[in-house]
Image: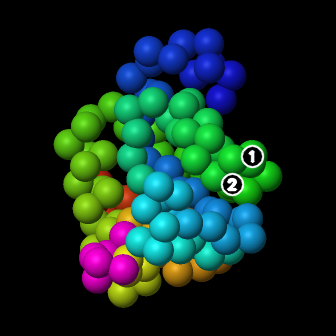
C-alpha cells in the first residue's frame, strides 16, 4: 500500500473495495434519521477512483476507525471494468441488500462473513475476465 500512498495519482489507485461496519449500529445518514439503520456486520461493495481515501471517508462517516474493516479487492485501470464489476456484484447480492424506509434497496447488505464475500467476488472477477 505504501507505493500508492506515495503516488496517489497512480492509475492503480482505483478499483473495487469491500467495507464492513463493525460498530454497534447507527443511522446511515444522521441528517435523515429513520431512512436506513446500519447494523453491526453490515457490508458494502463499492468502487473508487481514489482507494487511498476510501477508508478515511468511511471513518469520517461512522466517526471511528475502530468501526470499519476495509478490504481492497482489486486495483484496476479500466473504469469500464470497474463499473461493470460493481454492477455484477450488486446483482449477485441483490437479495442481501438492505431496504430503506422509502422501500429502495441500499448498497449496504445484511451482515455476512468477509471470507464468503471475497470468494463470491473472486468468482465474479474471474468470470468477468474469462479466467478459469
Q: Residue at x 74, y 70 (%)?
A: 24
Is residue 76 one of those drawn in magenta? no
Q: Secondary structure at mark 2?
A: strand
Residue 121 vs residue 26: left or right?
left
Please state the total of marks drawn on the protein image.
2
Question: Residue 10, percent across and down?
Answer: 44, 18
Q: Residue at x 25, y 37 (%)?
A: 79
Does the residue at mark 2 contact the one at mark 1 (Cβ under 8 Å)?
Answer: yes
- Farthest-out residue, bottom: 95
Question: Residue 84, percent across and down?
Answer: 23, 54
Q: Relative to 34, does residue 52 appear above or below in the rendering?
A: above
Per the rendered image, the range of residues in magenta is: 101-106
Question: Residue 61, percent across and down?
Answer: 58, 47
Q: Relative to 28, does residue 79 appear above or below in the rendering?
A: above
Q: Residue at x 47, y 55 (%)?
A: 31
Q: Is residue 41 visible?
A: no
Q: Secondary structure at mark 1?
A: helix
Residue annotated with mark 2: 68
Q: Front-most of 23 and 7?
A: 23
Which quadrant would the C terminus be assigned to in this image?
bottom left
Is residue 102 one of those drawn in magenta? yes
Question: How many C-alpha atoms fall within 10 Å of the one at disc 2: few (<14), some, or many (≥20)?
Answer: many
Q: Front-most of 27 and 46?
A: 27
Residue annotated with mark 1: 65
Numbered badge on residue 41: none
Alpha-carbon span between mark 2 and mark 1: 6 Å
Q: Residue at x 54, y 13 (%)?
A: 7
Question: How many C-alpha atoms fall within 10 Å of the one at disc 1: few (<14), some, or many (≥20)?
Answer: some
Amino acid at each position: 500500500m505504501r507505493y500508492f500512498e506515495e503516488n496517489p495519482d497512480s492509475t492503480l489507485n482505483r478499483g473495487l473495495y469491500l467495507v464492513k461496519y463493525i460498530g454497534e449500529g447507527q443511522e446511515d445518514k444522521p441528517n435523515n434519521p429513520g431512512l436506513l439503520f446500519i447494523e453491526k456486520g453490515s457490508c458494502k461493495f463499492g468502487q473508487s477512483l481514489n482507494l487511498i481515501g476510501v477508508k478515511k471517508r468511511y471513518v469520517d462517516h461512522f466517526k471511528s476507525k475502530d468501526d470499519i474493516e476495509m478490504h481492497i479487492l482489486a486495483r484496476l485501470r479500466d473504469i469500464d471494468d470497474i463499473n461493470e464489476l460493481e454492477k455484477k456484484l450488486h446483482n449477485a447480492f441483490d437479495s442481501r441488500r438492505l431496504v430503506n424506509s422509502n422501500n429502495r434497496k441500499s448498497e449496504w447488505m445484511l451482515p455476512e462473513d468477509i471470507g464468503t464475500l471475497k470468494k463470491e467476488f473472486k468468482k465474479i472477477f474471474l468470470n468477468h475476465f474469462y479466467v478459469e
